[in-house]
Image (tube, rainbow, N blue to C red):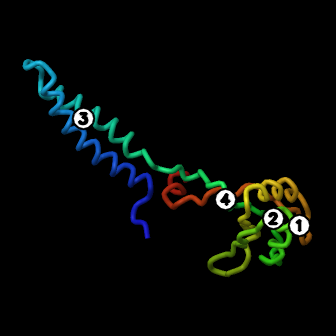
Amino acid sequence: MQFTSPPVRFLIKAALLAILLGTLGFFISSALLPDGFNATLAMTIGSFTGALLGAWLAGIGEKPATAKAPGEPHSVFVGNLNFKAKPEDLRVLFAQYGDVHSVRIMTDRATRRPRGFAFVEMDKKGARKAISALDGQEFLGRKLRVNEGKERRNDQERQNEA
């Protein structure tokens, strides 16, 4: 279980590194600057340098959220889905275009009834083929809307959008 989101962890790492490097920068600046120089200026130069280096170092090794490994399954959004559609039906339909890893038909939390859309996870090449072939095609009496699935947003991102 994660207690903090990646942006919060990044800010914590950047702040800690800024404090550490700012203090180190203060001592280096005060040692290198002439004697008549103001200590406040040395602290400002050290803190600013530490903040920049801290932010840069905190970001090293962070993998972008949208980057996918070559073999990782890609999500395909299937909209305008007939409410009678079953996961097996979608698996058979999408298997014509590539390996299907999973099928999730989304349901209402309260009623447990289908919401009319699903996500199919499959290999990247098969996902591209399925999107181009199935978008706008009729399936169980309805024209499907098929496009690339987007990463699920966390609660913080949804609140920022509203």
Mark 1 or mark 4, which has the lower sequence index? 4
Mark 1 or mark 2, which has the lower sequence index? 2
Query: As drawn, which residue projects farthest toward the bottom?
Result: 111
Helix, strand or loop at disc 4? loop
Disc 4 target residue? 71
Dot 4 amino acid type: Gly
Real-space CA distance between mark 1 and mark 4, rounded to the nearest whole angstrom: 32 Å
Q: Residue 102 appears at what percent x and percent y?
A: 71, 71
| The one of 121 and 69 positioned closer to us in this rendering | 69
- Left or right, 71 with respect to 57, comes to right
Disc 2 target residue? 80
At label 2, counting other C-alpha atoms closer than 10 Å, the crowd grade (few under 14, some 14-19, many 20 or more) is: some
| Dot 1 and dot 2 residues touching (CB under 8 Å) | yes
Disc 1 target residue? 142
Real-space CA distance between mark 1 and mark 3, rounded to the nearest whole angstrom: 61 Å
Q: Nearer the viewer, mark 1 or mark 4?
A: 4
Real-space CA distance between mark 3 and mark 2, rounded to the nearest whole angstrom: 55 Å
Q: Is residue 36 above or below residue 105?
A: above
Q: Residue 16 appears at what percent x and percent y?
A: 28, 48
At label 1, counting other C-alpha atoms closer than 10 Å, the crowd grade (few under 14, some 14-19, many 20 or more) is: some
Q: Nearer the viewer, mark 4 or mark 3?
A: 4
Mark 3 or mark 2, which has the lower sequence index? 3
Dot 1 amino acid type: Arg
Q: Residue 127 appears at what percent x and percent y?
A: 77, 58
Mark number displayed over residue 47: 3
| The one of 93 and 144 positioned closer to us in this rendering | 93
Q: Nearer the viewer, mark 1 or mark 3?
A: 3
Dot 2 amino acid type: Asn
Q: Nearer the viewer, mark 4 or mark 2?
A: 4
Real-space CA distance between mark 4 and mark 2, rounded to the nearest whole angstrom: 29 Å
